[in-house]
Image: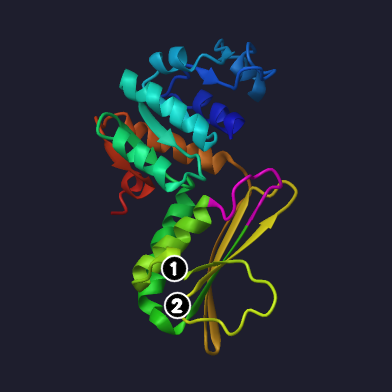
Amino acid sequence: MGRALLEAVLSAPDLKLAAALEQKGNPAVGRDAGELTGSPCGVKIGDDAAGAIAASDVLVDFTRPDGTLAYLAACRKQGVKLVIGTTGFNETQKREIAEATRDVAIVMSPNFSVGVNVAFRLLQVAAAALGKGYDVEIVEAHHRLKVDAPSGTALRMGEVVAQALGRDLKKAAIYGREGVTGERKDETIGFATVRGGDLVGDHTVMFIGAGERLEISHRASSRSNFANGALRAARFVASKKSGLFDMADVLGLR
């Protein structure tokens, strides 16, 4: 995602790359960030988060929860807005992010693809229209290096469907099945996870009824769509003073 974001921002005429961050000790530190895309840009990859954030208007973060929260504290102190694409936060970490939005504006989404966020809306419509007569199963597939499961996008899809059906996802979700599980309970929402190779990201939600099945799917073939969506979010949040937003706000889908 870092490389995809660099390619996108360096080709955007209305945006300027202020800094690029990596973990301390990463061999990329000290290199020209543009070298990763084949076009040197004069911005060195650094590991000084406070300095990089101070030089920026918006931080775009696709890391891991602990890293995001460290950046969050620095952004809150400096008044720098954030676009957060990290997934895998626990409830305490989510509350910490929400608390920070009193002081800075944040766009947070499990998936910055415009197509995926349109799919969220389609799922809302489908679940509300189909009602309780259809079983819901969610299947997601990602590359072998992804560390959290199910994906944040799959979980968000489950949340959208559960809300439309008047269910609590924490009670309805079934994460995998094994052994003699008994008959499927009507109110459950099933999740299945696939990990392998270099899959960018596939998501399918199945509404399975008597005699028919409706599937809503999104398949990503490159990370450029996520990067372009994240920059769209950066443009949006740059004009906000505080508050927590998501891609539905960015895309005007509210």
* 158 versus 107 height, above or below: below
Q: Bounds of the magenta span?
A: 141-151
Q: Hey, which quadrant is residue 32 in on the image?
A: top right
User: In the rendered structure, which amino acid carries the disc numbered 2?
Assistant: Glu
- The residue lying toward the viewer, choosing from 95 and 126, is 95
Instruction: Provide the residue designation for mark 2.
Output: 187
User: In the rendered structure, which amino acid carries the disc numbered 1?
Assistant: Lys
Who's the residue at 46% across and 26% down the image? 70
Total labels: the figure holds: 2
Who's the residue at 47% across and 47% down the image? 110
**Relative side of 145 to 115, left or right:** right
Q: Quadrant of the C terminus?
A: bottom left
Q: CA distance from mark 2 to mark 1?
A: 9 Å
Crowding near the residue tagged with mark 2, few <14, some 14–19, many ≥20 C-alpha atoms within 10 Å: many
Label 2 secondary element: loop
Q: Quadrant of the N terminus?
A: top right
Q: Hey, which quadrant is residue 118 in on the image?
A: bottom left
Identify the main secondary structure in magenta. Answer: loop
Who's the residue at 47% across and 32% down the image? 68
Q: Tell me if residue 147 is in the magenta stretch.
A: yes
The image position of residue 233, as x and y in percent, is 39, 37
Q: Hey, which quadrant is residue 126 in on the image?
A: bottom left
Instruction: Provide the residue designation for mark 1.
Output: 171
